[in-house]
Image (cartoon, grey):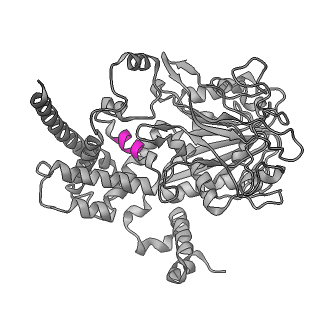
Amino acid sequence: METLEEKFKNMHLLDRGERIKLTNELNIQKPEFLGPYVPNWWWWRRCRVNVLIACDGGLNFGIGGFDLSEFLTTFNELEARSWVDYRVTLAHRGAIINSANPVVVNHISGFNFDTSVNLDDFDQVWLFGIQSGGSISNAEINAIEAYMDGGGGLFATGDHGSLGRAMCGNIPRVSEMRYWDNTPVGSTNATNEVSMNGRRRNDTNTPRPGNATATTFDHQSDDYPQQIAVRTFGGGLPHPLLSIKTSVRPSGIIDIMPDHPHEGECASETSFTVNGVTIPTQIIATSFVNGGNISGSKSPTDPHCFPSISVWDGRPANVGRIVIDSTWHHFVNINLNGAGSAQSGLTNPDWEVIRQYFMNIATWMNRRRFFLCLRPYLVYELLRDSQIIEASLNNPGESIEDISIADLNSIGSLAEEILAEKFTPCFARYFLLDTIEEYSKEYCEMMNCWAPEINEKSEQKEKADDYYTGWLNLDLVLHTAIGAGFIALRDNKKMSTDDASEKDLEMVSETFLSGIKLGFNKSLDNLNNKFNGFAKTMRM
């Protein structure tokens, strides 16, 4: 068998797909033999993200149908695409099945949230619950709540009925964002909507071509996923959890999920007040039930729809973000690769779409410090991108003060385009806004189309006499400011060469921000002159 070094030396003999796979592997492992072939900055240490994934009951981490081995590749793929080192701890309330995945650094059996680990050591916690009887202790619930209030992100899911209630059903905020039991009589949703056999069960199995209904249980493991309806924001962007690069999905939207004969359900939108700030939850995806599905020997379904993905952005209250999914069948092997069934699972293209959803969750619910750590790495990587180099060196001797705002805008727009293709369009937009927020928080609040409308702002919006769309294309301000940031880095002799050291990375954000400040003000001055001139000319 060829060693990694031998594969690298024969890389020119591989087909394109094998070369891409090998490149990703080299990006993760960074073997010493690559030293002469890559620039110094390629060896800079990565931002570290500590992840805890906890299961109970029959869910585990092996290669069986109700295991999560396919899902765990999410973190390998994330490492291959960015400057991040994921350290994953796997935990089980009972006996754990170990994973051979290299991102896994620890396995814990007999897990308790208050005694087995210090939750503050983690940046994100994932909960996959199947047990319904009893509950985790009050001490464990308090530990999880303290973790969330300290800024940690939390993901939680179960399945139909009360599956998952034991681990997740009593956690503050989480308990109200999803039904952790069957929908009761008199609820806002129909009775028995999260049952296993009722006509109103959440059966999302997709009929195969030529069929009117889904007739067998194993439809959940075939290569026909369910179509979901996705909420859009601003100019048609989905929530960052459901964003994907347009070269994979032209719409830029993740519009499929694995299907299942009886999913759980997210609760209707509500709001939570934390640290004096009231923030609503947001339903970002809706699933559909086809009329007449029997999925084996179940009652034929009544057609309906239900909320299947819900989020809560605690950032305005300085606490952690929360993601809730209707079912862990969106994540386990039997639905992804068909393990334990007679089917083969999702096609490779559909699997890549679903895994992007997993990666988006892992990115979005990270602590705030993650984005601060990642910023200089991505900005420097963009600076070294051939397209940015070409654009920024159009007039290399021209000072930043003399470069036209049109040229600055084109550089910033190009940076967003590159990020959108490397990651997702929503990540690109959020990353740039998060960067410019250091200079103008008010502008970023205005531009953040995903920001939950906290109560005071919502009331003001309802009373305002305004258009549904704004007067101005404020993207010009964003891109001009970002473009000026890259010119400032270009003019920094240390950062514009391959001799930059990891210590020099510390000046990236500061230098970039100085350019942003100049470009931002330059753009606003032009806006002020044009808009005032227009108003004076047209006023009767």
Reply yes or no: does residue 248 show up in magenta. Answer: no
Viewer-proximal residue, 103 or 76? 76
Reply yes or no: does residue 434 show up in magenta. Answer: yes
> Can you say which quadrant of the picture contains the N terminus?
bottom right
Residue 98 seen in the figure = no
User: Relative to residue 138, is residue 239 depicted above or below?
Assistant: below
Write the start and end of the magenta stretch as one range.
Answer: 429-435
Name the residue located 24 percent from the left edge and 61 percent from the top edge: 391
Relative image position of residue 460 (x, y in whole percent): 38, 17
Relative image position of residue 342 (x, y in whole percent): 83, 60
Relative image position of residue 193 (x, y in whole percent): 76, 30
User: Relative to residue 341, is residue 317 depicted above or below?
Assistant: above
Name the residue located 28 percent from the left edge and 38 percent from the top edge: 474
> Can you say which quadrant of the picture contains the C terminus?
top left
On the rendered structure, is 25 left or right of 371?
A: right
Quadrant for residue 453, please give it. Answer: top left
Quadrant for residue 421, please give it. Answer: bottom left
Name the residue located 54 percent from the left edge and 45 percent from the top edge: 242
Viewer-proximal residue, 144 or 263? 263
Viewer-proximal residue, 518 or 262? 262
Residue 433 seen in the figure = yes
Relative image position of residue 408 (x, y in whole percent): 22, 51
Dominant secondary structure of the residues highlighted in magenta in the image: helix
